[in-house]
Image: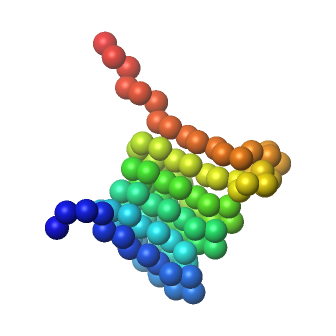
Amino acid sequence: MAGNKLTVLSAGTFIRGDLYSQDVLVVEGGVEGNIVGNRVIIKNKGWVHGNLLARSLCIEPGGVVDGAMKVNESAVMTAGEAGERLPGGLAQNLIEVKTEEEPQG
């Protein structure tokens, strides 16, 4: 089958255990365990208590990841249109983290 596959963990749903996703995983509920995925989106009321490994990660304002995060390509944590306060008291509209390119030589 061609195309992206979408897995949604809906609000009000809680999973205890590790999750693996080859395509897009949207977390609106809660996960107590580790996540390994291609593209992971943590929505505003979503939370993860465990480690997260993804190729691409987006965390919306209010979304929580309580554990180590490793992102292979890009990560975005938005702070909303009003420039909400982020941890450390920073007021930002967007934080983007990209991995370093491998040295050539």
* Image position, residue 80 (x, y; %): 71, 56
Report which quarter residue 11 is drawn in: bottom right
Identify the residue at the far left of this view: 1
Quadrant the C terminus occupies? top left
64 relative to 20 in the view: left or right:
right
Query: How many discs appear?
Result: 0
Can the viewer see residue 32?
A: no
Q: Who's the residue at 59% across and 72% down the image?
A: 46
55 relative to 58 in the view: left or right:
left
* Image position, residue 48 (x, y; %): 55, 69
Identify the residue at the far right of this view: 89
* Image position, residue 47 (x, y; %): 59, 70
Can the viewer see residue 74?
A: yes
Asked if 38 appears above or below 96 in the picture, the reply is below
Asked if 18 appears above or below 54 in the picture, the reply is below
Quadrant the N terminus occupies? bottom left
Q: Who's the residue at 62% across and 61% down the image?
A: 60
84 relative to 38 in the view: left or right:
right
Asked if 36 appears above or below 91 in the picture, the reply is below
Identify the residue at the far top of this view: 105
* Image position, residue 50 (x, y; %): 52, 66
